[in-house]
Image (cartoon, rainbow, N blue to C red):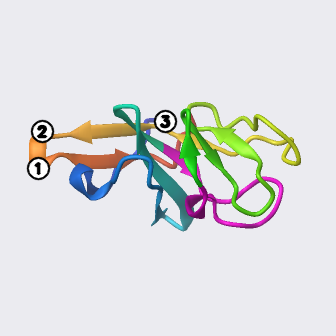
Amino acid sequence: MSAAYVRVCGLSELEEDSPKRVEIDGVPVSLVRTEGEVFAINDICSHANVSLSEGEVEDCAIECWLHGSSFDLRTGKPSGLPATQPVPVYPVKIEGEGADASVLVSVTQES
């Protein structure tokens, strides 16, 4: 089955290290532009049912604002307690260049 990519926003809409929450086919996703890349990670912390997009981004990880668990944006794996379960991450494609570049994400296939 091939991944179905959906345009979620323009690349210029994403601020560096500032998560943006979007919903794709009912799936809450946090988009993060950091270190020259764009990552898509499920927006719900695996430890507590809270939005990761409200957390801080540092060193290619997003921190849950409630209890401080941090998740690697590349793998979704937690790097500290209290979270022990990873959160899904999704493949991202950038189409176009410059001001017209678009961010596309597939939630049908976890990466």
- Is mark 1 in CB contact (under 8 Å) with mark 2? yes
Number of numbered discs visible in the structure rendering: 3
The vertical placement of 35 against 55, above or below, is: above
- The kind of secondary structure element at disc 2 is loop
- The kind of secondary structure element at disc 3 is loop
From the top left corner, tell me how far across and down residue 28 is, in percent: 56, 63
Foreground disc of the pair 3, 2: 2
Highlighted magenta segment, given as a residue range:
40-55
Name the amino acid, label 3.
Met
Residue 18: within the magenta?
Answer: no
Residue 5 in view of the camera:
no
Q: Which mark is residue 1?
A: 3
Distance (Cα) linking label 3 and label 2: 28 Å
Name the amino acid, label 2.
Glu
Name the amino acid, label 1.
Asp
Q: Residue at x 33, y 37 (%)?
A: 93
Residue tagged 1: 100
- The kind of secondary structure element at disc 1 is helix
Q: Is residue 69 left or right of residue 13?
A: right
Q: Residue at x 14, y 40 (%)?
A: 96
Residue tagged 2: 97
Q: Residue at x 76, y 34 (%)?
A: 79
From the top left corner, tell me how far across and down residue 6 is, in percent: 35, 53
Mark 3 or mark 2, earlier in chain: 3
Residue 88 in view of the camera:
yes
Distance (Cα) linking label 1 and label 2: 6 Å
What is the crowding at mark 2: few (fewer than 14 residues within 10 Å), some, or many (at least 20)?
A: few
